[in-house]
Image (cartoon, rainbow, N blue to C red):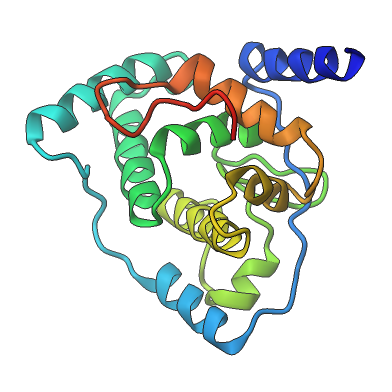
Amino acid sequence: MLKKLRISLLMLLGTLVPHMSYAGSQIEEPLSNSVKALMQRSVSDRAAPTLTFATKEEGQAWLNEMSQRLQKRMPDQQYREDFLRTVHYEASRAGLDPQMVLGLIQVESGFKKYAVSSVGARGFMQVMPFWVRSIGANDHNLFLLRTNLRYGCTILRHYVDIERGDLYRALGRYNGSLGKPEYPNLILGAWRKNWDYTPNRWSVAPKNI
């Protein structure tokens, strides 16, 4: 009973205090040559971000809705829309739900571009610098919007693959807290509370992950 209450309070905190960072420490693990090569190709692909909806009208409806929700956190409209387009593109490209990624960014950095955690994780998705050494190039700046989101989504996709589709465990790996419920539940809470989007058939947050 106390455990359930504690998790519920943590989920509530994730929705009511979006400016707080919950960044953990991603763990540097050895990668096989094939995995490293695949991830290197992934972060080096720099195609222009586009919305991946069936029609232009559906994409615009999503952009308008998400822009309205994000306005208080990102007052500049052009930057806000560029951010949302990039989130949608990078998440979709990695096979992740863009709405979940928005929830993750809320919890990780509070939508702060230059957020730095106590362990050195950087940017919107709180990417650890060792990833640049492992799969990137020396000139990759983790404070740049597209670079940060490309790395973050690529890394989370890698963890989803390791966990054979288990998002709960993948999120634990992303935060360096594998096996603990608090972080995945915070992401789920932020996703359900602030970023659900029903018109997109696959973007409704599940009750459990």
Q: Quadrant of residue 59?
A: top left
> What quarter of the picture does the N terminus occupy?
top right
In the picture as drawn, the residue positioned furthest to the right comes out as 2
Instruction: Please indicate whether residue 149 sits to the left or right of residue 90 in the image.
Output: right
Q: Quadrant of residue 52?
A: top left
Indicate left or right for 154 with 4 as reference.
Answer: left
Residue at 62% x, 20% y is: 18
Residue at the image point whose x is 27% and y is 30% from the top: 201
Residue 107 to residue 170: above or below:
above
Q: Which picture quadrant has residue 155?
A: bottom right
* Left or right: 170 as drawn, with respect to 179: left
The residue closer to the viewer here, 189 or 153, is 189
Residue at 59% x, 35% y is 209
The residue sitting at 30% across, 24% down in the picture is 77
Q: Camera-side residue: 197 or 135?
A: 197
Q: Position of residue 2 (x, y in %)?
A: 91, 13
Depth order, front residue of 179/67: 179
Q: How many marks can you see?
A: 0
Residue 90 in sight in this render? yes
| Residue 112 appears in the rendering | no
Pinpoint residue 187: horizontal percent, then vertical percent.
Answer: 61, 31
Instruction: Return the x and y of residue 41 as percentages of the image width and height.
Output: 41, 77
The picture places residue 182, in percent across and down from the top left corner, at 77, 31
From this view, report whether residue 186 is shown above or below residue 45.
Answer: above
Q: Is residue 40 above or below residue 130?
A: below
